[in-house]
Amino acid sequence: MKNIFLSSLLLIAVLVLQSCEDTIDIDLPTDQIATPNVFKDKQSATSALSELYINLRETSLFTGKSQGIGSTLGLYTDELTPTYLPPSSDTFFIFHNSLDPTRFVISSLWNNSYSHIYAINSFISGVTNSNGITTEEKEHFLAQAYVLRAMYYQTLTQIFGDIPYTTSTDYKVNTKIVKTPVFEVLKLIEQDLLKALDTLSYSDDSPNKYYPNKAVVELLLAKNYLLQKKYEKAELYSKLVLDNPLYNIETDLSKVFKKSSKSTIWQLANTTAIAATYEARNYVLFTSNSGSILSNNLLNCFDNHDLRKQLWTKEFQNSGKIHAYKYQNRTTNSDECSILFRIEEAYFILSEALVYQDKEKEAIVYLNTIRQRADLLALPSTLDKEQTLDAMLKESQKEFFLEHGRRFFDLKRNNKLSLLKTSKPNWQDKHALFPYPDKEILINPNLNPQNDY
């Protein structure tokens, strides 16, 4: 992992030159990044924090670009079909579930994530040791950094399983660190989120919801407790999100992915005020053989009168190729931002938590809120536990397609990845985990044993 942590300083120095709407107001000298002097006052710390958000948008797991988990896991599961498939490309191996530890997609997901985690840990250290920032300012800066670190680790452990967990900025230590078991990582993530919860308010200091606030933390905690199988706590925190008057389910499906959507909890600023989201550039076809189209498996799960199919998908020029159309502005854009979290997810977290507490009748009520908004008939209250769980997964598939790998994570969390065998001929149970990058194992043998792949 030595190369990861050494490269992170260069990564941040490059990203500091990029602009971010409503987030970058201060130019930061590149030779001061990750040094104590960068946090000499609130202004310089604010600029350094902005770089962490740029990392998130540009090169992280959560980017809307093709290397993000939206595309990667969409191809890996049953959401996307490539229009062009060179046999030596990463896309070919992802789509055919034949990844190996030498593939660039594996090293990219891993290296970028740990570079960003290093930057976050460096930021936390710099803020903590600063003498020019007030205690109140420190708490606010640290809370946002804890949220970001939790997001990375929570996603990495769902993809790779046991992973190195570090809060250190000493690369010599980090190159020798052992793997931490999944459930221990989840508990460490929980600690970060609880610290953030104590500090952040429901106001994020941005009218455009560009920063994480207390509701974001509650949603992340609810997801964390689902993974820990602490269903009462998952229920508690998802209900807090649903009961928040700042957010409401967006009943007009044409507005869900607009900047002003009532359901958005956290979204990322674009590179400029008129730049398209990366999702629009990635998923909306520009030519008939560019990018990926929606798979037949996904399209066939919709009823024809489902409003989500009508409004969130689109055929490319009478070609029979259907692409995602959640984000629509592929060129000039002023009303869309990349959404990280929206309140609809809380409905599904709550439904799942209720099912595993044998409260399926209550779960069905929340699922029906989602269905009826899509102009579908309500599910009957007579469904048993397994039927309710299956209905929830099918509804989530239609609601969250291509949104940060939620299809893969939903199936994995509920031990249902085997469902992919009907549409993915190469799917095997071992594909629940990605392999560790081979170069990282060479640098740090403590990553052994390698995941089966």
Image: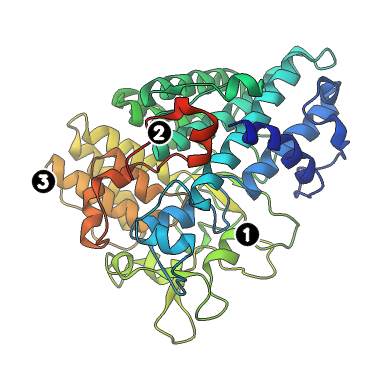
Q: Is residue 165 above or below residue 308?
A: above
Across and down, in percent, residue 213 comes to: 59, 32
Side of 411 relative to 31 (left or right): left
State the residue position of label 2.
Answer: 223
Side of 452 relative to 165 (left or right): left
Across and down, in percent, residue 332 comes to: 70, 69
- Where residue 60 sits, quadrant-wise, is top right
Which of the marked residues, 1 or 3, is nearer the chain's N terminus?
1
Q: Is residue 438 above or below residue 134?
A: below
Say the numbered circle drawn on residue 277. Answer: 1
Q: Nearer the viewer, residue 260 or 200?
A: 200
Identity, as a three-letter code, of the amino acid under mark 1: Thr
Judged by depth in the image, the label closer to the viewer, 2 or 3, is: 2
State the residue position of label 3.
Answer: 382
Tell me the residue at 25%/33% (across/down).
354
Identity, as a three-letter code, of the amino acid under mark 2: Lys
Identity, as a three-letter code, of the amino acid under mark 3: Thr
Tell me the residue at 75%/58% (across/down).
273
How far, Cα to Cα, is label 2 from label 3? Answer: 27 Å
Tell me the residue at 83%/26% (across/down).
38
Which of the marked residues, 2 or 1, is nearer the chain's N terminus?
2
Across and down, in percent, residue 241 comes to: 45, 34
SS category of the residue bearing label 3: loop
Q: Nearer the viewer, residue 80 or 381?
A: 80
Q: Residues within 10 Å of mark 1 (few under 14, many from 20)?
A: many
